[in-house]
Image (cartoon, helix red, strand yellow):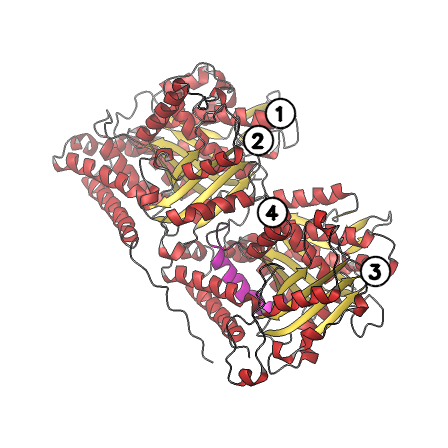
């Protein structure tokens, strides 16, 4: 069994990460009734005997002693990490996994990337190496960060570069939280575009998540649960925004939104952790979904978002789950994949779902979904037999789809608006190592990415003839 | 004589486990000593305590499936795998043929060869080796191809049969056509014969003939195992003089793979039905064989929706090569009959020269094996292994889709990373286009 290390950077990254660890513990507690440290647990947790002075690790198969998260927490202010250390999750982290500063990055990518990146480089590498040493087969780094602020976007993407330098063989999957258009951070377009270039060049896969989509989903679920119509009553313990059953008690304001992202990470790794009739390993994600190295932005959608309390009509609901995964309001970014072009699509199913259910639904949905001419059958599927807590089944769809383009175009416009006036530029150029060329290069990188998506998009309605086959001399 | 099976990757290990299960249960049903002894000698060795241990090596690059298959075998209480005849790693090949063939394969070559060698040394007489794998993923296809190459090096004179599971046309692995093309092109020069099961076909058998509502992978694998078992279990050939213990792989290869350009074998079996229907059905040999013959010439892989209009072309038509596209021409066929009154079965319908190419007479192109033992709860059953145009269309599709993807160079960077060049792809495409051309020009 392989292991993964989660690297959470900045306020948002740490809050999401915190929800992830809470829900991961809940999920494993639900599945693992014997209290033994099993292979599934070992993928995200170490088992440590605290009585031994060296904190000796207990092998797979032994009793659970002390679970420690395979995580590195980085923030340039103390607030969030301190809160975690005072909260119920304090047991799963120890001080050697943490790195904080006191003064923050002031919503400035350059401060995070250049200043802190250089100052803390050695320490970060040291902590990453330590986490890696605890794994006997490290497969994947999951980086969680936001794009809008200073620490997450600046230092987060610096960490990404360090991961590539130090662990070139290990897969890097990044979850990036994109700011809303009405973001209160005025420099967020700068930070996002500067970070985008790093993501395009150094990540294996990026799972973009938009703040606004999370807000919309949370509101929709709340609305459903208050409307109280017969037949649409929601079981509170099984909607994906609920953290009930976790070790944390009262819910904080952003918890509902962060839970959605935490669920995304749980589901993406479920097939690598648990058994299933069609395993899907983490290294298969990039292999199947990334046809060209730079086009590695995978739009996630999660279904069901909630479970109705009414338990009848099971198979109809199963088919509904597949339909929902392609609908606009289940995407974690604001995009409409059905009306754009699919380059590839992965369906990761959990729970009691058979291959025939999967095939029936792919056959049913295929005609309505436009796929690029050379990948008309671009489906990758995984079946994991363990469902998420509170659900009988669930589906995570990852789409490599040109529908990410509008989000990027939008970002470029907001960037251009600031950059034309050279607004706030001096804050960035103050920072040692930062040059104005970084801005134009980041802009050029984003533009060429948009252009690549655009060219593929343009083939959508045209009939592309098959490539002429090799002819064989008779 | 004994067969050593090498199970590779998730699919190979799952299908292999189902196969041994059927072989073991079939041999143990009732009192039929010579048959049972021959079957055991072929596929199992017995410990001093009388336990049956499969002559198999389990290989995967991740541990879950190997562990599952071993545990399932153990639970059967009838047979098990050898305690040390398995090898797994922690991290899979990630659906990447190049990762399996260029990295994992060479890295673990010594261990794998050693496991196979130990299993071979346990056999009194080695009939040959059978490698079971899928062509879609990374381990079965990539490591499988590499291991087949190693086996060819170590056992240059032994028969090597590859059993391949072809993926569903869509929905399993996106790069499956690349992986398939690379696998098939390489196996074509290494293997003596390539026996193919298509998931799509088997899935249809599960839903239409066996009436399974929610089809799982184990249902699909069980059908494959049933068909494969009915080919591999002991049977009497025309010149075996009532003695079961012959070389199953050698006889299969010499009956069917007579030309290096034609190595693709397809299988169909009748009857196949849900166990509740068997009790209400009676079978006659003329009825079964009439259906099976029409399935062969119309290329229908199951006993439903058979096109009865298709006929072999008359001799005069052949010279003008006006054969309709729906007629399925064979290079060679092997018919295996099992069950009651098997010696009364009349197989003349398969000896029609019009079914075969002009360069091989039916006497050389057609063979029958018979066994009076009913197989796997069917009173009478017939299996046809066919080297014919049956796989031409799926192969052509596979090559066409891969070529289309290759034209835009999509996903190629993932293979180059592990040491496969664009030229390697081109070589594979060229050799498979040759195979496609050879089969489509059969006359």
Q: Chain of mark 3?
A: B
Please indicate whether residue B227 sits to the left or right of residue A406 in the image: right
Asked whether disc 1 touches disc 2, contact meaning CB atoms under 8 Å apart, the reply is yes
Q: Nearer the viewer, mark 1 or mark 3?
A: 3
Q: CA distance from mark 2 to mark 4?
A: 26 Å
Q: Is residue B107 visible?
A: no
**Residue identified by numbered label 3:** B35
Q: Are marks 3 and 2 on the same chain?
A: no
Please identify the quarter of the rendering in which residue A430 is found: top left
**Residue identified by numbered label 1:** A64
**Residue identified by numbered label 4:** B217
**Residue identified by numbered label 2:** A41
Q: Is residue B365 visible?
A: yes
Q: Chain of mark 4?
A: B
* Bounds of the magenta segment: B168-194
Judging depth in this view, the residue of B97 and A307 nearest the camera is A307
Q: CA distance from mark 1 to mark 2?
A: 10 Å
Q: Nearer the viewer, mark 1 or mark 4?
A: 4
Q: CA distance from mark 1 to mark 3?
A: 52 Å
Near mark 1 (Cα within 10 A), the count class, few <14, some 14-19 or many ≥20, is some
Please indicate whether residue B92 sits to the left or right of residue A87 in the image: right
x, y percent for residue A137: 55, 41
Judging depth in this view, the residue of B275 and B189 nearest the camera is B275
Near mark 2 (Cα within 10 A), the count class, few <14, some 14-19 or many ≥20, is many
């Amino acid at each position: 069994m392989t292991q993964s290390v989660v690297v959470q950077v900045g306020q948002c990254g740490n809050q999401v990460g915190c929800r992830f660890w809470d829900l991961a513990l809940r999920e494993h507690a639900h599945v693992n009734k014997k209290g033994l440290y099993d292979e599934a647990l070992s993928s995200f947790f170490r088992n440590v005997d605290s009585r031994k002075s060296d904190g000796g690790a207990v092998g797979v198969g032994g009793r659970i002693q002390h679970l420690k998260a395979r995580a590195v927490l980085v923030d340039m202010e103390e607030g969030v990490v301190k809160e975690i250390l005072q909260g119920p999750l304090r047991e799963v982290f120890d001080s050697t996994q943490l790195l904080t500063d006191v003064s923050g990055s002031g919503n400035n990518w350059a401060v995070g990337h250049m200043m802190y990146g250089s100052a803390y480089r050695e320490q970060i590498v040291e902590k990453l190496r330590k986490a890696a040493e605890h794994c006997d087969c490290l497969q994947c780094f999951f980086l969680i960060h936001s794009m809008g602020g200073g620490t997450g976007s600046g230092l987060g993407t610096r960490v990404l570069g360090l991961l590539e330098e130090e662990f070139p063989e290990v897969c890097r999957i990044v979850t990036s939280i994109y700011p809303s258009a009405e973001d209160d951070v005025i420099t967020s377009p700068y930070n996002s575009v500067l970070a985008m270039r790093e993501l395009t060049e150094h990540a294996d896969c990026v799972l973009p998540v938009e703040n606004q989509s999370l807000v919309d989903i949370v509101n929709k679920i709340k609305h459903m649960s208050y409307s109280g119509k017969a037949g649409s009553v929601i079981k509170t313990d099984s909607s994906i925004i609920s953290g009930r059953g976790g070790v944390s008690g009262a819910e904080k304001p952003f918890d509902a939104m962060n839970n959605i992202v935490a669920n995304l990470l749980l589901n993406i790794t479920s097939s690598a952790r648990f058994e299933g009739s069609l395993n899907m390993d983490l290294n298969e994600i990039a292999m199947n979904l990334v046809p060209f190295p730079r086009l590695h932005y995978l739009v996630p959608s999660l279904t069901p978002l909630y479970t109705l309390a009414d338990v009848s009509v099971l198979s109809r609901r199963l088919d509904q789950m597949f339909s929902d995964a392609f609908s606009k309001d289940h995407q974690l970014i604001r995009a409409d994949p059905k009306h754009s072009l699919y380059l590839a699509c992965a369906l990761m199913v959990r729970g009691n779902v058979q291959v025939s259910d999967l095939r029936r639904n792919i056959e049913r949905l295929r005609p309505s979904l436009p796929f690029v001419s050379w990948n008309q059958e671009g489906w990758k599927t995984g079946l994991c037999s363990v469902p998420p807590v509170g659900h009988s089944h669930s589906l995570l769809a990852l789409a490599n789809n040109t529908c990410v383009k509008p989000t990027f175009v939008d970002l470029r416009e907001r960037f251009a608006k600031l950059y034309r006036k050279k607004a706030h530029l001096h804050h960035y150029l103050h920072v040692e190592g930062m040059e104005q060329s970084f801005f134009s290069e980041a802009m050029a990188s984003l533009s060429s990415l948009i252009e690549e998506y655009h060219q593929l998009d343009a083939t959508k309605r045209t009939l592309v003839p098959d490539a002429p086959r090799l002819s064989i001399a008779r | 004589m004994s067969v050593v099976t090498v199970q590779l990757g998730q699919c190979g290990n799952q299908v292999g486990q189902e196969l041994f299960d059927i072989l073991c249960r079939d041999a143990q049903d009732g009192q039929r000593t010579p048959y049972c002894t021959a079957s055991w000698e072929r596929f199992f060795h017995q410990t001093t305590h009388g336990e049956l241990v499969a002559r198999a090596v389990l290989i995967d690059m991740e541990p879950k499936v190997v562990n599952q298959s071993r545990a399932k075998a153990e639970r059967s209480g009838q047979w098990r795998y050898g305690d040390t005849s398995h090898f797994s790693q922690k991290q899979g090949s990630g659906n990447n043929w190049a990762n399996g063939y260029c990295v994992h394969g060479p890295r673990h070559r010594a261990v794998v060869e050693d496991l196979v060698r130990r299993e071979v040394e346990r056999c009194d007489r080695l009939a040959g080796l059978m490698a079971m794998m899928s062509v879609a993923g990374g381990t079965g296809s990539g490591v499988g191809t590499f291991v087949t190459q190693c086996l060819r090096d170590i056992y240059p004179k032994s028969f090597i049969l590859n059993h391949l599971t072809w993926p569903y046309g869509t929905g399993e692995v996106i790069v499956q056509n690349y992986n398939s093309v690379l696998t098939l092109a390489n196996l074509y020069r290494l293997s003596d014969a390539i026996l193919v099961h298509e998931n799509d076909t088997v899935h249809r058998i599960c839903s239409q003939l066996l009436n399974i509502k929610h089809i799982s992978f184990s249902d699909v694998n069980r059908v494959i195992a049933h068909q494969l078992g009915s080919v591999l279990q002991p049977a009497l050939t025309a010149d075996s003089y009532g003695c079961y213990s012959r070389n199953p792989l050698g006889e299969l290869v010499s009956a069917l793979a007579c030309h290096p350009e034609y190595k693709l074998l397809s299988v169909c079996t009748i009857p196949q039905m849900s166990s509740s229907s068997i009790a209400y059905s009676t079978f006659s040999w003329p009825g079964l064989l009439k259906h099976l013959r029409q399935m062969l010439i119309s290329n229908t892989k199951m006993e439903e929706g058979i096109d009865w209009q298709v006929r072999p072309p008359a001799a005069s038509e052949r010279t003008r090569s006006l054969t309709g596209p729906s007629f399925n021409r064979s290079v060679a066929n092997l018919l295996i009959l099992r069950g009651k009154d098997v010696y009364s079965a009349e197989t003349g319908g398969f000896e029609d020269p019009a079914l075969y190419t002009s360069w091989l007479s039916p006497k050389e192109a057609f063979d029958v094996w018979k066994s009076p033992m009913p197989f796997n709860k069917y009173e009478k059953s017939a299996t046809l292994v066919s080297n014919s145009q049956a796989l031409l269309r799926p192969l052509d599709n596979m090559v066409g889709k891969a070529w289309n993807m290759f034209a835009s160079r999509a996903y190629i960077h993932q293979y180059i990373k592990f040491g496969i060049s664009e030229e390697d792809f081109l070589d594979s495409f060229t050799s498979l286009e040759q195979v496609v051309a050879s089969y489509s020009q059969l006359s």
